Image (cartoon, rainbow, N blue to C red):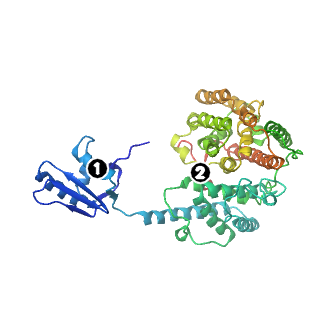
């Protein structure tokens, strides 16, 4: 962490109630509230001078503030500034809080307006009407409190395809639950945006008490989440909204953790077999070893997943897990922390300017994937442990996707150098064993909890499958690489 110093104030002023100095005295006293501070000097002339200077410092425009801010650490001026600051006697003169709230409200209102306009621009009236109906219905779910470990009641469970057969409406319900816990500013903005889509807009952010802080939450993430919600709202009335066919849940009974995981692996394999080859894999194979933006796409999106990856582990660290499980989760966290540096280097090797990585808006389903995993880690460790399989791969399965991608960029030496190191690191860490490793320590899981977890794993599988298909759609049609920017605009990777 960076050490705080008084030199970091933008417009400092001395905040005290009174300064007292008797002529001829070598003592200066300051009073601030109930506290009094005395400064003793060798001679009264020095005390006279300091008293006058302290009076001057109550004015933020005083030239003495420049002298204090430019002072060397071992100087008397620096010592004075440090004394005043460590006793909480320096404050910012400019009261910009109201302006900051107003500016943030304007940014959020603009973000909502631009998102709605960009989403609706190419849709006909029939599709717009469908979006308005869905937005109005979804808005009713926004005010529910954050749920307990079950997240949703059985009759209202969006993870269950029998309850909510529309994938995108289910995803939005799950996103709302994530926003309640991790992104309340976004939740409030989504409420305003759904109002705009439904034709029943509420007051702007400037008149909404929920927008009560500035600088607490990330506004780029808010923008990315608004695009995720709006894109999903459109997709919910599209031709591919229905849930994909999944394997039936087995007849579960009270069993050990390892038996539960074995059954979960079986329905995972059966479900993936039903879906067949992902469109992204088919598109990469069609390149016949050639290179196209389609190959760069996963590494760009993976950067955004990896940047947030420790979020899906962090909630587990505060739980009172058994010692072996707690130890494993802390180790998993430490082994994943900082991997985004490897991913960003990979993106640079593929020709993407580093500064653009912060401007990219992740493709919606990749962003949602991390949200869903984080929500489960916060609410349900059983589902979270099983979900590691979705992230890291099924135990015993080769990394087919990685091998295909490495073959597609075989002539890019810079890429091979950095990406190869990352793949080698991942293999050495045995992360595709973590799900089994965790369930080895769980002696019993009741049938209801197993069924809940299996529904959640099947949803995550579908989310991941659709996210990869989204990479194929966005990057596959590009003759030259373009990045996904705000409001669906394209960004030049070179900046």
47 or 460, nearer to the observer: 47
Disc 2 element: loop
Q: Distance between the residues labelled 1 and 2?
A: 47 Å
For image coordinates 58% across by 48% down, the residue present is: 360
Tell me where residue 210 appears, x and y as whole percent: 56, 66
Image quarter of residue 233 = bottom right
Which residue matches tag 2?
485
Tell me where residue 110 appears, x and y as whole percent: 55, 63
For image coordinates 62% across by 48% down, the residue present is: 362
Tell me where residue 426 appears, x and y as whole percent: 65, 30
328 or 199, nearer to the observer: 328
Which residue matches tag 1?
83
In this orientation, does residue 481 appear? no
CB within 8 Å, label 1 to label 2 = no
Q: Nearer the viewer, mark 1 or mark 2?
A: 1
Disc 1 element: helix
């Amino acid at each position: 962490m960076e050490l705080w110093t008084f030199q970091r104030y933008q417009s400092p002023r001395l905040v005290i109630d009174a300064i007292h100095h008797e002529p001829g005295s070598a003592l200066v006293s300051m009073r601030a509230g109930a506290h009094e501070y005395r400064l003793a000097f060798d001679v009264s002339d020095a005390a006279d001078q300091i008293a006058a200077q302290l009076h001057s410092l109550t004015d933020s425009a005083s030239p003495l503030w420049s002298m204090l801010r430019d002072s060397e650490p071992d100087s008397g001026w620096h010592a004075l500034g440090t004394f005043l600051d460590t006793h909480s006697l320096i404050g910012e003169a400019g009261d910009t809080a109201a302006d900051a709230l107003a500016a943030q409200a304007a940014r959020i209102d603009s973000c909502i307006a631009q998102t709605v306009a960009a989403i609706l621009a190419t849709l006909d009236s029939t599709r717009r009407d469908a979006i308005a109906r869905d937005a109005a219905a979804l808005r009713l779910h926004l005010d529910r409190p954050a749920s307990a470990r079950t997240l949703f009641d059985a009759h209202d469970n969006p993870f269950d395809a029998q309850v909510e057969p529309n994938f995108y409406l289910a995803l939005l319900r799950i996103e709302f639950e994530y926003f309640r816990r991790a992104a309340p500013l976004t939740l409030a903005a989504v409420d305003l945006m759904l109002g705009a889509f439904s034709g029943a807009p509420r007051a702007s952010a400037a008149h909404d008490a929920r927008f009560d802080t500035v600088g607490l939450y990330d506004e780029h993430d808010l923008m990315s989440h608004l695009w995720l919600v709006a894109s999903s709202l459109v997709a919910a009335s599209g031709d591919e909204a229905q849930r994909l066919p999944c394997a039936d849940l087995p007849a579960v009974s009270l069993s050990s953790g390892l038996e539960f995981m074995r059954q979960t692996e079986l329905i995972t394999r059966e479900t993936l077999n039903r879906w067949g080859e992902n469109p992204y894999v088919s598109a990469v194979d069609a390149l016949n070893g050639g290179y196209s933006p389609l190959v760069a796409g996963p590494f760009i999106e993976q950067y955004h997943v990896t940047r947030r990856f420790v979020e899906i582990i962090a909630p587990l660290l505060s739980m009172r897990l058994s010692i072996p499980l707690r130890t494993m989760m802390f180790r998993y966290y430490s082994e994943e922390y900082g991997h985004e540096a490897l991913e960003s280097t990979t993106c640079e090797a593929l020709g993407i300017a580093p500064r653009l990585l912060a401007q990219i808006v992740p493709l919606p389903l990749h962003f949602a994937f991390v949200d869903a995993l984080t929500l489960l880690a916060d609410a349900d460790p059983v589902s979270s442990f099983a979900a590691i399989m979705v992230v890291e791969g099924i135990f015993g399965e080769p990394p087919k996707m990685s091998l295909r991608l490495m073959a597609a960029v075989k002539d890019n030496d810079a890429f091979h150098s950095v990406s190869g190191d990352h793949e080698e690191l991942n293999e050495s860490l045995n992360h595709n064993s973590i799900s089994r490793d965790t369930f080895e320590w769980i002696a019993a899981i009741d049938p209801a909890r197993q069924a809940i977890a299996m529904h959640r794993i099947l949803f995550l599988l579908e989310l991941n499958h659709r996210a990869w298909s989204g990479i194929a759609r966005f990057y596959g049609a590009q003759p030259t690489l373009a990045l996904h920017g705000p409001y669906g605009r394209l960004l030049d990777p070179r900046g």
